[in-house]
Amino acid sequence: MNPVILEHYKHPRRHGALAAPTVRRRDVNPFCGDEVTIDLLLANGRIEDAGFDGRGCSLSLAAASILLDNVTGRPIDAVRRMSSDDMLALLDMEIGPIRRKCALLPFSVLQACLAEEKNGHE
Amino acid sequence: MKTTTLDRAAALRADFPILARKIGGRRLVYLDNGATSQKPEPVIRTLDDYYRFHNANVHRGAHTLSEEATTLYEQARLHIARFINAPSDTQVIYTSGTTESINLVANTWGRANLGPGDEVLITEMEHHSNIVPWHILRDQLGFTLRYVPVTDDGLLDEDALDDLLTERTKLFSFIHVSNVLGTVNPAAELTARAHAVGAKVLIDGAQSVPHMPVDVQALDADFLVFSGHKMCGPTGIGVLYGKRELLEAMPPFKGGGEMIRDVKMSGSTWADLPHKFEAGTPPIAQAIGLGAAVEYLTGIGMAWVHEHEQELLAYAYPRLGEIEGLRILGPGPTRRSGLISFILDDVHPHDLAAVLDQAGVAVRAGHHCAQPLHDRFGISASARASFYLYNTPEEVDILCAALEKAQDIFAF
């Protein structure tokens, strides 16, 4: 097992719901039933705070921990421009086509959060 | 455990070239047979020979190769018919697999026979392939879909059947052996009860036909469906068996070449069974390959395959049960097939599969295409070890050791 993934799985950063999130989204991985909920606090064009909850394998939950740690404090527009490959690069490990779905679940929920926020303002 | 059974399994391993593979430097312990089985040399050679020496389209042309390909294709059908004791090979329809077989019945028999006020009965332990086609059809035709509950022990609630099976029930479609719980359902008894109220019966044999003797006449099944790739055959080929009068009355499923008798500008008439349901160029090599698989299994004897898997189960069930924090899903070892699904405290099934893979052990992790069943037991996913004729007790030991290692890695 990848020690960084294991460390984030056992001691996740940004774990738990936010008290007053600007936006909250939940999604499931249809291949295994895993689910991740992400809360974002958005202000001044930035992700001011982020939290997640869910049930899943070490890869999907560690990916949430690593991703939210990375994006907190960053401009929303920059995070919106992140690609799936950027997400996989954050994990810095070899991931096969089946586990990619685990690794990308939190990323897709995060992007859905930001899309919802954008639609809400337009 | 009888040494004769084990010696035979050990000898049979030599027939499966892939079992010599190493995974990350370790011997492959293949325990994902419920998903697909490995292929023996005679099947691989049959496919190779077909493409090398006999390849042509079937039932078309009058050249030597076409005659040879057609003969092989139809001989395979005969072997398969004998394998399930079908009264005639014309009642063996080639499909792409169990899923297509069920969709065929839903879209032909179902469309002709189901409407508002009618009921289709399935069970809580069905694979998605025996749920979703009925969801789609129900939304179009307006019949009611009902489910036989599953008990906490992982058995069908047979008491509930009295209320669920009524004169409104037009079809009872159930899984013979659960791909998650391993439960062996009493198919002949269930079929008799359905017939008593006038319902037709479809038996999903995807997890039974590869592992035990299955006799469609003894079961009195109206339809039996199964897949080739789970029983030593190639992917892309499966079977729909049906009673003659039902198949004859059913309209075609797909239109195209091969399935017609006569085509005019004004309309078409259909070919006789089984070709009425085999539109277009069929999976020829795959059908011939399945024929070879069935010959291979017949040579070994399905009674032996079943006995061997039961012996492995009798060995594995208590061994797994000894692992602290491991919970086995489904019934005790006497009413189940040779597969065991389980959850392990603090280790997600995906993580478990990943750690086992590092030990060379291949198992399935996820909801096994049976989400309603996992919901029933309040879990999102499980891990499954499923045996076949080539597995050995040593492999069970390797599995158990790897499970304990996974617990160490993920302990909080």
Image (spheres, grey):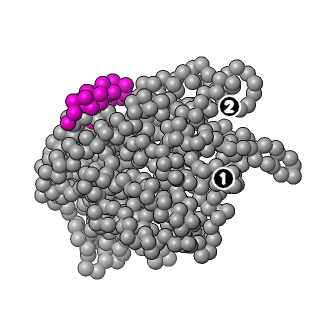
**Residue tagged 2:** B58
Q: In this rendering, would A22 be left or right of A120?
A: left
Label 2 CA crowd tier, 10 Å (few <14, some 14–19, many 20+):
many
Q: Is residue A38 visible?
A: yes
Q: Between B271 and B258, which is closer to the camera in this rendering? A: B271
- Please, what is the three-letter code of the amino acid marked with disc 2? Val
Q: Chain of mark 1?
A: B
- Residue plotted at (28% across, 80% down): A20
Mark 2 or 1, nearer chain start: 2
- Residue plotted at (21% across, 40% down): B396
Q: Quadrant of residue B88?
A: top right
A90 relative to A27, above or below: above
**Residue tagged 1:** B245
- Quadrant for the C terminus of chain B, please: bottom left
- Where residue B74 appears, as percent x and y from the top left, is 62, 32
Q: Quadrant of residue B51?
A: top right
A50 relative to B100, above or below: below
Residue B2 highlighted magenta (yes or no): yes
Tally the marks: 2
User: Which of labels 2 and 1 is toward the front?
Assistant: 1
CA–CA distance in space, label 2 to label 1: 26 Å
- Please, what is the three-letter code of the amino acid marked with disc 1? Glu
Instruction: Give the extent of the magenta segment.
Output: B1-30
B394 relative to B49, above or below: below
- Quadrant for the N terminus of chain B, please: top left
- Where residue B162 appears, as percent x and y from the top left, is 44, 72
- Residue plotted at (64% across, 49% down): B244
- Where residue B411 appears, as percent x and y from the top left, is 13, 55
- Where residue B272 appears, as percent x and y from the top left, is 72, 44
